[in-house]
Amino acid sequence: MEKEVTIQSKVALKGTLSIPETRVEKNPAVLIIPGTGKLDRNGKVNKKLDLKLYRQLADFLTSIGFINLRYDKRGVAESEGDYLTTGLWDLVEDARAAVRFLKGLPEVDANKVIVFGHSEGSMLGTAVASREELGGLILLAGAVETLSEALKRQRDIATQDIINAKGFQGFLLRLLGVQNKVEKQAQKYIDKVLNSTSDVMKVSFVKTNAKWMREHFTYNVREDLVKVTCPVLAITGERDIQANAEVLKDLSHYVKGDAQYHIVDNMGHSCKYITKTSTMFTAKKDIIAEGNLPLHPELIKSLEAWLQNHFIINASQQSDII
């Protein structure tokens, strides 16, 4: 069963609550936090770019008996607010409001609310987990890494793609020295934003959410990871060019409690099964095509095993003891 709900933060956020048909009196519940950009509660930006990811995750969670909530971010789709003036800490506060909303539902076990963040949602989820009592934390395609680190890695990949590009396009880009300009242009843009004071500013005649970027660039997600005491699961695809799978190996160095990670073969940022790693030239086309694919089967397997082990099997064992 699905129903539309309103989460009251500083603005009213619109979301969808999914409730399995088979449930007990008090149930574990999962909050899905979306990634960067104007993604709605289902993972849609516009008609052309629709990841469908969060809708797919919600359907999966419902199918294995977990209540779940997904929502439109501030200033996106049906939620109130202004997207461009929204900062990192506004998004964190909205996610905390959603956690409190779930904890207040009569059918939810307030001790078993799990935050599930994707991409930027992993950073937001980590910030929430260090400030709210949670039953668990799932970090998908974005754990143990700051936004500035992720963007730098993406620029390095783009530079290498230009160097390796074949044909006339590659020849022309290298002739123009584009590979030498990627980092310089990025740093010029970053410096301009970081030295600004307004929430929104124009860079090359395009409005940018300066407050959001400034707050991200001063936020160290690892400082919050060390405050997390609930069980943590981190998953990133081995073909993900937006998140670094290798940093997952450091997860246990920060999290005090139970921490597990999986690097999934043939999975990219949209969490679907792919056989080729995207380049800066194919990334947009690829992610549009991946929207029509199902969730990666290995991702589903890892999520189900972890959720069942921590919130179903353990709960039944405790009830047997009682």
Image (spheres, rainbow, N blue to C red):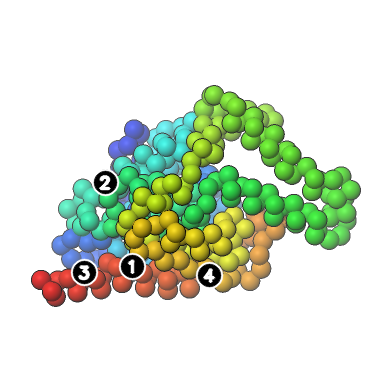
Please give the name of the residue rendered at 59% of the width and 31% of the height, measured from the top-left corner: 194
Amino acid at the residue labelled 1: Leu
Q: Earlier in the sequence, mark 1 or mark 2?
A: 2
Please identify the residue farthest to the front as the structure is shown. Answer: 253
Q: Which residue is mark 3?
A: 315
Amino acid at the residue labelled 2: Phe
Q: Earlier in the sequence, mark 4 or mark 1?
A: 4
Local SS, label 4? strand
Check contact, mark 2 vs mark 3: CB within 8 A: no
Local SS, label 2? helix
Nearer mark to the viewer, of 2 and 3: 3
* Above or below, comparing residue 205 to residue 226 in the picture: above
- Residue 121 falls left or right of residue 206: left
Is residue 32 something that shows in the picture?
no
Q: Which residue is mark 1?
A: 307
Q: Quadrant of residue 200?
A: top right
Check contact, mark 3 vs mark 1: CB within 8 A: no
Nearer mark to the viewer, of 1 and 2: 1
Query: Neighbour class for label 3 at 10 Å: few (<14), some, many (≥20)?
Result: few
Q: Which residue is mark 2?
A: 101
- Residue 318 falls left or right of residue 63: left
Please identify the residue farthest to the left as the structure is shown. Answer: 322
Q: Residue 14 versus residue 224: which sits nearer the camera?
A: 224
Q: Earlier in the sequence, mark 3 or mark 1?
A: 1
Q: Which residue is mark 4?
A: 264
Task: Give how far apart the Cα atoms at labels 3 and 1 are.
Answer: 11 Å
Task: Give how far apart the Cα atoms at labels 4 and 2 are.
Answer: 32 Å
Amino acid at the residue labelled 3: Ala
Is residue 24 something that shows in the picture?
yes
Measured as percent of width and height from the top left, residue 290 is found at: 58, 62
Task: Give how far apart the Cα atoms at labels 1 and 2 are.
Answer: 21 Å
